[in-house]
Structures are given as C-alpha cells and as structure tokens.
Image: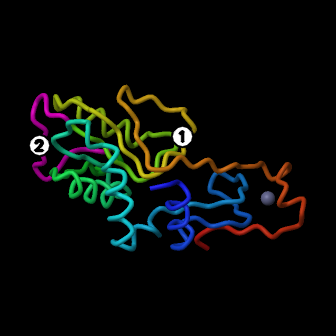
Amino acid sequence: MTDQTVLQIFRDTSALLEGHFLLRSGLHSRQYFQCALVLQYPRHAETLCSALAGKLKETGAMVVISPAMGGLFIGHEVGRALGLRHIFAEKNAAGTLELRRNFKIAPGEKVLVVEDVITKGGRVQETIDIVRKNGGNVVAVGVLVDRSEGNVNFGAPLVSLLKLQIETFAQASCPLCQAGQPVVKPGS
Ligand SMILES: [Zn+2]
C-alpha cells in the first residue's frame, strides 16, 4: 500500500483534515488527524491493518497487545490478519495501564505491541513495560501512523504503515494567521 493510497483513505473519511487548526497544545497547524474517524469504517480498518500486518509477518510474534482505547481496533485487526490472539492493557482508576480480565502473557512469549498513532509513544512504552514485567519478549511495535519524527526508542523495531509529519506553529509566527484565515478548533 503506498503512502498516497493511505493518505487518500484518511482524507476520504475526514480522518485527515486540511485547513487552519488550533490544537490542544495551543499551537496552530494546517492539518489535523483523528484516527478514530477512519476506524469507524471496519472495511478501511481491515484494509489498513492487513497492510500493516504484512509488514509484521516476520517478527515471529505469538500474541498482539495494544493499549485501550485507541489501539483496540488496530490490535484486533492485526491479530486477525496474522492469525494471533489479541489482548489489551487498560487504564485503572489511577490512570495507569494494566493487564486485567485474566489476560496472560507466558514467560518468553513473543509479543507484538500495536497502537493506532504514536507521537511521544508514552502509552506504547507503558504497554511494553507491562509485557516485560510479565516476562514477555517484545519483538516489535506496529503502528498505523507514526508521528514521532524519529524521537522514540522502544528497544524493539518500530514498524509503521505511514509516517505523518504535521507542522505546527506558535500563533505569533503562524502563516495562516498572517494570511487572515480563521482558525478552527477541531471537534467543536
Ligand atoms: Zn494560525
């Protein structure tokens, strides 16, 4: 699957918007990406995840794990494409990820960590820590969209379907503000 094909699906489903956006960080951007909007179409989720799974076939993984909520659908579809079971880590009352519902990782089990989007990779790292604490062996991290710009190191290979770089601006130096284009807060 080419980057152009993936981007076209993101645009067609409004997961990737073009315009002038005010981000939660307070910065402005020309693009806004909301992965859930593409995943609301199971057909697209299946297509994208089987393409991602194709890049992860050689890892020898025995189980897929993802952090809830964002990673659930990706992990499930990647698990289906690879014929593996899929488990997930979820937030407890303290906001920390943990393995619940009697999900088990066997000592030495080869584990593939799957997430929808990474930027700083915090939730992926938390999931990796859980796997290692349970004696599992993280063989790779698979993500639909890598927004990290190369700034993460999980101690395991990182495989993405698409690398997406979204340029951000402080309001004072935003070219769109300077052009007088009205700014939009996504989701409002
Ligand atoms: Zn602006």
Disc number placed over residue 104 in the picture, else none:
2
Q: Is residue 11 above or below residue 65?
A: below
Q: Position of residue 177 (x, y in %)?
A: 85, 60
The span picked out in magenta is 97-110
Quarter-wise, where is residue 75 in the image? bottom left
Query: What element does badge 2 sit on?
Result: loop
Q: Check mark 1 vs ligand 1: CB closer than 8 Å? yes or no.
A: no
Question: What amino acid is at disc 2?
Answer: Lys
Ligand 1 is located in which of the four quadrants?
bottom right
Residue at 20% across / 36% down in the picture?
60
Neighbour tally class for label 1: few under 14, some 14-19, many 20 plus, Cα within 10 Å: some
Question: Which quarter of the rendering shows the N terminus?
Answer: bottom left
Residue at 25% across / 44% down in the picture?
98
Q: Position of residue 95 (x, y in %)?
A: 36, 48
Question: What amino acid is at disc 1?
Answer: Ser
The span from disc 2 to disc 1 (Cα, nearest Å) is 29 Å
Task: Report if residue 181 lies within the magenta region.
Answer: no
Q: Position of residue 123 (x, y in %)?
A: 39, 43
Q: Is residue 183 above or below residue 175?
A: below
Query: What element does badge 1 sit on?
Result: loop
Indicate left or right for 132 with 155 as reference. left
Mark nearer the N terminus (2 vs 1) = 2
Q: Check mark 2 vs ligand 1: CB closer than 8 Å? yes or no.
A: no
* Pick the front one: 89 or 142: 142
Give the residue at mark 1.
Answer: 148
Main secondary structure along the magenta-highlighted residues:
loop
Task: Report if residue 103 lies within the magenta region.
Answer: yes
Indicate left or right for 160 with 99 as reference. right
